[in-house]
Image (cartoon, grey):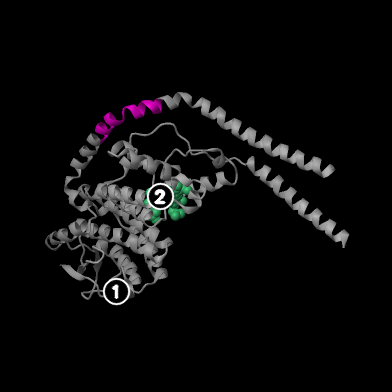
């Protein structure tokens, strides 16, 4: 009997807590009612805002006009862009550490090693943090920062994830590194390879095809699209 | 015989009691709520021309963890569900915040769209631990096709 009372008591406490908890929320919701209305009017202005914003967006785009083409991560476009690379690639050793770390990831994926790819990801993060931004001109700084931001994000995911996920991020990373080379140049001789199965490109330091997207499964799938330097 | 049975029952009762007390106790631990009543101008839905159906799907399925405003039905407010949500919201927003879409660089938009598409395609998002309670957040094959087709178009132009 006593125990029954005890359990009833505890149940009561449970309910009291839950009630208190939900009361708090109710109060909060009331306080926010005013703001709710502003949210509604935001929705009404939906289409108007749409215009506003896309305008702002265009402005932004206009200022970085030169970089427009590189924004396209689409592999086909990346490939056609490669043609510019041979023409415009400057000899620049400053990007070497970044490119080496990229190859560390690439070669790990070629050998299906998740662990080594993760190490390469860490090396890439280090290479970006060591990169001397002072060497950049006003014209290249903004785009460098966008490329670096994206590449570092891909590297972080490569550090943490299973291999299929690493390969997914390596795809975006390859676009980023290719754009970085287009922007800043390199003193290395590189090859831009293309995998028609996956419709993706990657960079390599050797002429023979070793496909990082499939590894041992389909090692030699792909072809050289362009030699850089 | 009888005695040991009694003590066993006692132990079970004590365990149940401890669990109950713990359950009540954790209700008092504060969690941070992810709530905002203002939809910023930079929101994905405001800067893109999103068909209503797609907008609904993404909002119901993704915005709880990938925006500044989580819906809090009662079960999201009770511990330990609230903790679970708090943790996922923190990590989820770091990865992707639909409310901040227009602030992303074009490069980032592209790579995010690519990730979003592959996460939906591979059934990795929304998290299965989440769709367990939020049934309406899960994607049917038809939903998947529609949403992915639309997102791919957005990515490629």
Quarter where residue A100 is shown: bottom left
Residue at 19% across, 59% down: A76
Whether marks 2 and 1 lie on the same chain: no
Residue A27 visible to the viewer: yes
Q: Nearer the viewer, residue A49 or A64?
A: A49
Q: Residue furthest left?
A: A87
| Mark 1, secondary structure of its residue | helix
Residue at 41% across, 31% down: B38
Q: Nearer the viewer, residue A70 or A194?
A: A194
- Please rate how many residues cluster around mark 1, counting C-alpha atoms within 10 Å: few if below 14, some from 14 to 19, many from 20: few
Left or right, B83 with respect to A38, comes to right
Q: Is residue A115 magenta?
A: no
Left or right, B99 with respect to B87, comes to left
Residue under pointer 1: A218
Label 2: chain letter = B
């Amino acid at each position: 009997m006593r125990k029954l009372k005890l359990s009833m008591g505890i149940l009561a406490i449970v309910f009291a807590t839950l009630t208190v908890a939900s009361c708090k929320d109710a109060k909060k919701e009331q306080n926010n009612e005013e703001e709710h209305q502003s949210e509604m009017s935001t929705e009404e202005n939906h289409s108007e805002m749409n215009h506003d914003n896309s305008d702002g967006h265009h402005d932004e785009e206009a200022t970085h006009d030169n970089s427009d083409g590189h924004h396209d991560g689409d592999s086909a476009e990346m490939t056609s862009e490669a043609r510019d690379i041979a023409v415009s690639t400057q000899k620049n050793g400053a990007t070497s550490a970044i490119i080496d770390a990229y190859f560390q990831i690439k070669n790990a994926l070629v050998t299906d090693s998740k662990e080594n790819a993760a190490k390469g990801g860490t090396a890439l993060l280090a290479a970006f943090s060591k990169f001397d931004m002072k060497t950049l001109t006003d014209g290249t700084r903004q785009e460098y920062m966008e490329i670096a931001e994206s590449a570092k994000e891909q590297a972080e995911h490569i550090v943490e994830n299973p291999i299929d996920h690493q390969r997914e991020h390596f795809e975006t990373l390859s676009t980023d590194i290719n754009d970085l080379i287009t922007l800043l140049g390199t003193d290395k001789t590189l090859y831009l390879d293309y995998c028609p199965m996956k419709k993706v490109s990657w960079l390599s330091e050797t002429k023979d095809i070793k496909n990082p997207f499939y590894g041992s499964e389909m090692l030699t799938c792909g072809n050289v699209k362009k030699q850089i330097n | 015989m009888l005695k040991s049975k009694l003590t066993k029952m006692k132990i079970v009762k004590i365990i149940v009691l401890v669990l109950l007390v713990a359950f009540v106790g954790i209700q008092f631990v504060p969690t941070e709520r992810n709530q905002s009543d203002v939809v910023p101008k930079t929101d994905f839905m405001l800067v893109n021309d999103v068909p209503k159906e797609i907008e609904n799907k993404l909002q119901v399925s993704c915005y709880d963890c990938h925006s500044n405003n989580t819906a809090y039905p009662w079960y999201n407010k009770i511990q330990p569900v609230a903790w679970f949500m708090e943790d996922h919201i923190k990590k989820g927003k770091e990865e992707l915040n639909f409310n901040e879409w227009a602030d992303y660089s074009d490069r980032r938009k592209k790579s995010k769209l690519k990730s979003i598409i592959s996460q939906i395609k591979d059934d990795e998002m929304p998290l299965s631990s989440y769709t367990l309670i939020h049934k309406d957040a899960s994607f049917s094959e038809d939903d998947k096709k529609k949403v992915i087709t639309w997102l791919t178009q957005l990515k490629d132009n």
